[in-house]
């Protein structure tokens, strides 16, 4: 399933599912870099799983200048400061 980032949760439109930071874990994180672009606009892909194990999917977000706004709790869960 595909997740979108909202300021305080991840959202799957096809299931009308919202997962708050305490409701999911990030299994993997991958940042993609391009030689032709600024490091501030490279995508980050998160593999996300709900804590109950029933829902798994991916979240694609920008990094740096173009990243979505989010709460401190979301930033902590996504561990955005490790990049």
Image (cartoon, grey):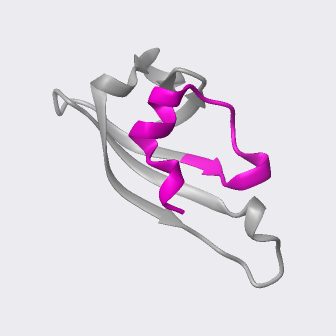
Task: Give residue 29's quadrant in the image.
Answer: bottom left
Residue for point 48% across, 31% down: 74
Closer to the camera, 33 or 17? 33
In the picture, the quarter occupied by the C terminus is bottom right
Residue for point 68% across, 31% down: 69
Residue 1 visible: no
Residue for point 52% across, 20% down: 8
Q: Is residue 16 above or below residue 58?
A: above
In the picture, the quarter occupied by the N terminus is top left
Q: Is residue 49 above or below residue 21?
A: below
Residue for point 43% across, 38% down: 76
Closer to the camera, 78 or 53? 78
Farthest residue to the bottom: give it.
35
Task: Give residue 21's quadrant in the image.
Answer: top left
Q: Is residue 74 left or right of residue 21?
A: right
Query: Residue 41, percent across and down?
Result: 76, 60
Q: Is residue 31 above or below residue 56?
A: below
Farthest residue to the left: give it.
52
Query: Residue 58, percent across and down?
Result: 45, 46
Look at the image and give the residue range highlighted in magenta.
60-83
Query: Residue 64, percent across and down?
Result: 72, 54
Residue 26 visible: yes
Q: Is residue 69 left or right of residue 27?
A: right
Find out whether residue 48 is within the magenta segment: no
């Amino acid at each position: 399933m595909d997740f979108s980032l909202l300021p305080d949760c991840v959202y799957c439109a096809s299931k009308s599912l919202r997962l708050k930071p305490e409701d999911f874990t990030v299994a993997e994180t991958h940042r993609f870099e391009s030689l032709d672009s600024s490091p501030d606009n490279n995508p980050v892909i998160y593999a996300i799983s709900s804590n109950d194990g029933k829902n798994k999917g991916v979240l694609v977000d920008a990094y740096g200048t173009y990243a979505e706004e989010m709460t401190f709790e979301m930033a902590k869960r996504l561990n955005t400061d490790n990049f």
